[in-house]
């Protein structure tokens, strides 16, 4: 579980994150949604300590990350996995070496045991026969899978994914979403995902935080988002007419009225 | 950013690099890789530059010494001392600032821009220690060796040019080579080599590690790194000469 209390981040005189509080629970996919430039990446980087927040606290299972010494932070970070927007694979290393890297660095397993573990996670993300390939030789979707494999190889308790769907086709996006959702449940991880993909919101939005210009504008689940009254959120989520129609239909359904004859305006 | 901001951040980078490795074996592996990149990777260019610089200095020294009162062997003596004192350490290191410096800056810049450095940080790795320290240590190990090779080959190139052009005989050259030799000159060349090794590795590492932006900025950072390193080498060259000679 991650608790965020009154987080604030300023660049120069620009307030990028303004007084955001939230609780991210374990075993759930926690989504941060919002338009480009709304501060999702900065928010996530504050959570993992790549940016220092100007105010506020971040508690990992009750431990205050913000006040920690470097050494304590390093220890905690071994329980954190992160998938970056551009996958951030080490481009001088093969897929296998990329996934093995955290094991090389932080475990005392022998090569055989490490290889076994690597093949297990690569198998888990449905990536076979790519062990010896270099990042430049595989597709965007495969890179994301390798990124996920590398992030979960040490069985982290916390998983962060910055726009896991960016640059992927809708079908591959869904597969990656499902994968993240499944491993979250399977290993009871606390997962935080930045996205502006509506499919992800509807499919895996256990807990959703909508950010608008650095502030938390709305919070709820994918079940609740349909009925939200926030105009900003509605304009963002149900941007197309098609989606607006879907929303109206769902709301009518919920009110128990017959849908018959109501489809289409 | 002003010069002092850069200098402060540079010092903090050096300080931040001095921690205990998370895993000695992985750091050792990285050090060996860097030794190979820096040492073997730039051996070819160092050999070519040294041979030609030595050859040219024999021809030019002969051209400037027109008096018959001065024995031919003096040419060898002058070539030996200029190669050891200045050409082998300084010219080699200026060339290395281009070859090694741009490589270090662009490698780290690319890792920064593609978030590979962030990915390492997230894993709980001190990236200053893991990425920069091995490059500096490898430079300390390899660059003095390259400078010694350059010195030997420079003198040998000078000898060859002297003989081929008929300026002096092998015996005359060897006589000059051995007369009035000061071992201190070799130590001086090595002091320079160590100083320049630190400049060539740490300054480009600084500019690469702190790149912001994209591919364009990596190119700019690498140019700035090479230019700054060259200027610092010349500056340090002067200071060392003023202090030690
Ligand atoms: N390192 C930085 N320095 C200054 N401003 C930044 C930095 N990183 C992000 N910003 C600004 O913060 C705002 C939010 O950016 P970001 O979190 O990347 O948005 P997104 O929601 O698209 O991920 C943007 O206006 C961006 O310009
Ligand atoms: Mg972003």
Image (spheres, helix red, strand yellow):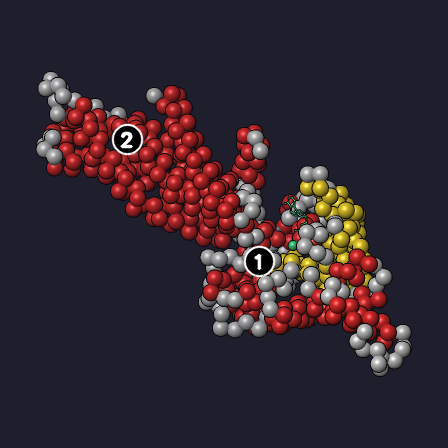
Q: Residues within 10 Å of mark 1 (few under 14, many from 20)?
A: some
| Residue A221 seen from this side | yes
Q: Element type at marker 2?
A: helix
Tell me residue A240's x, y (percent).
73, 66
Question: Alpha carbon of mark 1 to alpha carbon of mark 2: how far?
Answer: 49 Å
Quadrant of residue A150 within the rendered picture: bottom right
Tell whether B86 sits left or right of B232. Answer: left
Q: Residues within 10 Å of mark 2 (few under 14, many from 20)?
A: many
Tell me residue B134's x, y (percent).
46, 45
Q: Is residue A44 above or below residue A8?
A: below
Q: Of A76 and B56, which appears nearest the observer?
A: B56
Name the mark on residue B84: 2
Tell whether B17 sits left or right of A241. Answer: left
Mark 2 sits near ligand 1, with its Cβ under 8 Å away: no
Which chain letter goes with mark 2?
Answer: B
Tell me residue B133's x, y (percent).
49, 43
Tell whether A12 sits left or right of B103. Answer: right
| Residue A94 seen from this side | no
Name the mark on residue A86: 1
């Amino acid at each position: 579980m991650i608790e965020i209390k009154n987080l604030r981040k300023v660049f120069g005189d620009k307030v990028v994150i303004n007084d955001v509080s939230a609780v991210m629970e374990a075993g759930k996919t926690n989504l941060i949604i919002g338009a480009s430039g709304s501060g999702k990446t900065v928010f996530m980087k504050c959570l993992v300590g790549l940016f220092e927040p100007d105010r506020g606290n971040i508690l990992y299972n009750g431990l205050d990350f913000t006040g920690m010494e470097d050494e304590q932070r390093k220890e905690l970070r071994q329980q954190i996995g992160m998938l970056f927007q551009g996958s951030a694979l080490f481009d001088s290393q093969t897929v296998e070496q990329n996934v093995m890297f955290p094991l090389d660095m932080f475990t005392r397993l022998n090569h055989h045991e490490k290889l076994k573990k690597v093949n297990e996670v690569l198998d888990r993300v449905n990536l076979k026969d790519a062990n010896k390939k270099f990042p430049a030789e595989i597709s965007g979707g495969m890179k994301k899978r390798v990124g996920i494999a590398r992030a979960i190889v040490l069985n982290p308790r916390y998983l962060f994914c910055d726009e896991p769907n960016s640059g992927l086709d809708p079908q591959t996006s869904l597969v990656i979403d499902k994968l993240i959702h499944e491993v979250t449940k399977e290993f009871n991880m606390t997962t935080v995902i930045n996205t502006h993909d509506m499919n992800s919101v509807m499919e895996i939005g256990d807990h959703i935080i909508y950010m608008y210009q650095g502030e938390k504008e709305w919070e709820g689940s994918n079940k609740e988002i349909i009925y939200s009254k926030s105009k900003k959120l509605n304009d963002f989520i149900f941007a197309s007419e098609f989606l607006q129609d879907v929303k109206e239909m769902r709301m009518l359904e919920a009110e128990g009225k017959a849908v018959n004859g109501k489809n289409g305006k | 950013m002003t010069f002092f901001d850069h200098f402060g951040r540079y010092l903090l980078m050096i300080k931040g690099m001095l921690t205990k490795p998370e895993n000695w074996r992985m750091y050792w592996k990285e050090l060996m890789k860097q030794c190979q990149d820096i040492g073997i990777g730039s051996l070819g260019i160092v050999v070519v530059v040294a041979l030609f610089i030595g050859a040219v200095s024999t021809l030019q020294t002969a051209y400037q010494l027109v008096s018959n009162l001065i024995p031919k062997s003096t040419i060898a003596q002058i070539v030996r001392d200029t190669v050891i004192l200045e050409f082998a350490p300084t010219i080699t290191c200026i060339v290395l600032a281009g070859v090694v410096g741009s490589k270090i800056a662009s490698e780290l810049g690319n890792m920064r821009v593609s978030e590979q450095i962030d990915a390492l940080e997230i894993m709980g790795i001190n990236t200053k220690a893991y990425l920069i320290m091995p490059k500096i240590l490898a430079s300390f190990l390899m660059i003095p060796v390259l400078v010694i090779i350059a010195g030997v080959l420079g003198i040998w190139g000078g000898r060859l040019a002297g003989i081929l052009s008929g300026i002096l005989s092998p015996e005359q050259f060897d006589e000059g080579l051995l007369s009035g030799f000061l071992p201190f000159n070799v130590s001086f060349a090595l002091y320079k080599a160590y100083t320049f090794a630190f400049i060539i590795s740490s300054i480009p590492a600084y500019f690469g590690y702190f790149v912001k932006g994209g591919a364009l900025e990596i190119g700019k950072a690498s140019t700035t790194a090479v230019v700054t390193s060259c200027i610092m080498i010349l500056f340090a060259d002067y200071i060392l000469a003023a202090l030690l000679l």
